[in-house]
Amino acid sequence: MQLRTQNIAFRYGKEPWLFKNVNFTVDPGEIVGLVGPSGYGKTTFCRILAGYEVPNKGSVTLNGRPIKSKRKGYHPVQLVFQHPEKAINPRWKMGKVLNEGWQPDQQLLDALGIEEEWLTRFPNELSGGELQRFCVARALGPDTRYLIADEMTTMLDAITQAQIWKAVLKIAEQREMGIIVVSHEVNLIQQLCHRVIEIDHLNT
Amino acid sequence: MMPTLTLLNKKQRALIVTILAIVFLMIVIVIGVVLDKESISTNLKHRNASPTFEHPFGTDWLGRDMFSRTFMGISLSIGVGLIGAFGSTLIATILGVISATMGKTADRIVSWLIDLFLSVPHLVTLILIAFTFGGGFKGIVIGIALTHWPSLARIIRAEVMQIRSAEFVQISRKMGKSSWWIATKHIFPHILPQILVGFMLLFPHAILHEAAVTFLGLGLSPHEPAIGIILSESMKYLSAGMWWLAFFPGLCLLFIVRTFDMLGENIRILMDINIDHK
């Protein structure tokens, strides 16, 4: 189940090309870091990989087969957004948010530090860090082959970061799940990743 | 924390006001329905009586009890307002959702329609439509339903467009949820408060316009106890010093309209998720 992009190019409307001819592969179980300055298209690239945007040229393939953006059913590449408060319906209680895609087991909730009493609260009664744990749990469904962490733990303190990444790495190892990490924190990237790509290399 | 002197929070206060307003409106409607038709029959012995205990709002030049006429008129107005506002809200919701979800052409057509209706004053279109349908209850209701939707349709359109592109809706799609599921679970609960509040705020408009059109003689027929008719008839007698003919019905109309306004505002507070239960 290799995730691969072939010669993808993207731009918003008629603006200049954000990137062209990007070739990129991630193998199952591999953890790849993506670093680069702001505004270089890291988030856009992540959105393309997860099927939120369609590249103007080229294709994204999983195991040799293209991923259609309009496909039905659970998307095997799941993206965790940077801002959890926007990624959660403010009218839903957290229990409903958590179970939208699948039913996480108690073990995962414990690993991510999600407490039982949070499930009956509304999103505006929890902090950003607490919400982000729900977003991570929600994205780790059994059919997730690749997880894209776009500044996933940027707003968290060091201890919580460590806790969440430990849980995610354990699951990734068990399921042979690939992870793409986008972060500005050099230490985090060095700790986690098998391979680091600098975004200006994407820009060729 | 600041020490607060109030016992109740904003939502609890809003809930109490809402319940009181609903109870008040219910009482008015019940009085209007229960009152005997006999009491507005002509009684020439008690013509032009100023307010007494027997006739709290006085009587008119035919000896009809103004209290009964006022409350019957208000019940009728609430009925007209209810049906008219409901029709308007329905049109607004359907057109708003269509224009937000069915592509650019649909959006352009609906936006054009909204602009068209907004560019002509309500009352003019309302009179034209009511006149075309032959006036009376039916004409007024159809007229109100067909003229009051544009601003609400515009709000609903904007709201649906915003929610459709929200991150949590995009995520839901990638979780494999169907469009129908997203529409009912994510989008509809978000626009429901707008619809309800819009409906409530249309209500006073509808009632006032009904009274206005009837006052101009293009609405309900003269033998019906409508507020607009009462007010227009009383014009002739005001100069003769019979102030109660216009004063009490007008005041009641004002109260009712204000109550609906308050109801809309408080329902908005109750459903606003950004005001929490502090």
Image: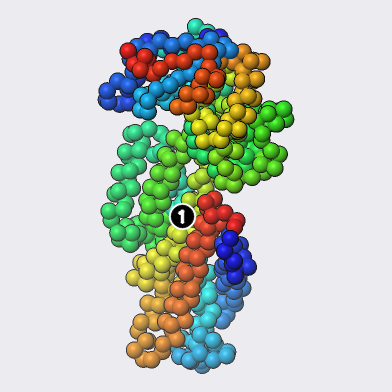
Query: Quadrant of the image for the N terminus of chain A?
Result: top right
Which image quadrant is residue B231 in?
bottom left
Badge 1: residue crowd in 10 Å (few <14, some 14–19, many ≥20): many
The chain letter under disc 1 is B
Q: Give whichever of A39, A35 is nearer the camera.
A: A35
Instruction: Look at 36% across and 91% down and name the residue there.
Output: B240
Instruction: Look at 35% across and 17% down and name the residue there.
Output: A200
Q: Give whichever of B103, A11 is nearer the camera.
A: A11
Instruction: Look at 39% across and 55% down and name the residue there.
Output: B148
Q: Is residue B169 left or right of residue B106?
A: right
Pick out the residue farthest to the right.
A106
The x, y position of residue A145, in whole percent, is 58, 16
Query: Is any part of residue B179 visible from this angle?
Result: no
Pick out the residue farthest to the front.
A187
Q: Give whichever of B112, A115 is nearer the camera.
A: A115
The x, y position of residue A3, in whole percent, is 50, 12
Identity, as a three-letter code, of the amino acid under mark 1? Gly
Q: Is residue B193 above or below residue A7?
A: below
The x, y position of residue A189, in whole percent, is 50, 21
Q: How many marks?
A: 1
The x, y position of residue B21, in whole percent, is 56, 67
In terms of secondary structure, where does tag 1 sit? helix
Query: Is any part of residue A173 visible from this angle?
Result: yes
Instruction: Look at 30% across and 26% down and name the residue there.
Output: A13
Q: Give whichever of B143, B107 is nearer the camera.
A: B107
Q: Is residue A83 above or below residue A70?
A: below
Colour scheme employed for the rendering of this structure: rainbow
Which image quadrant is residue B161 in?
top left
Query: Quadrant of the image for the C terminus of chain A?
Result: top left
Query: Residue under circle 1?
Result: B198
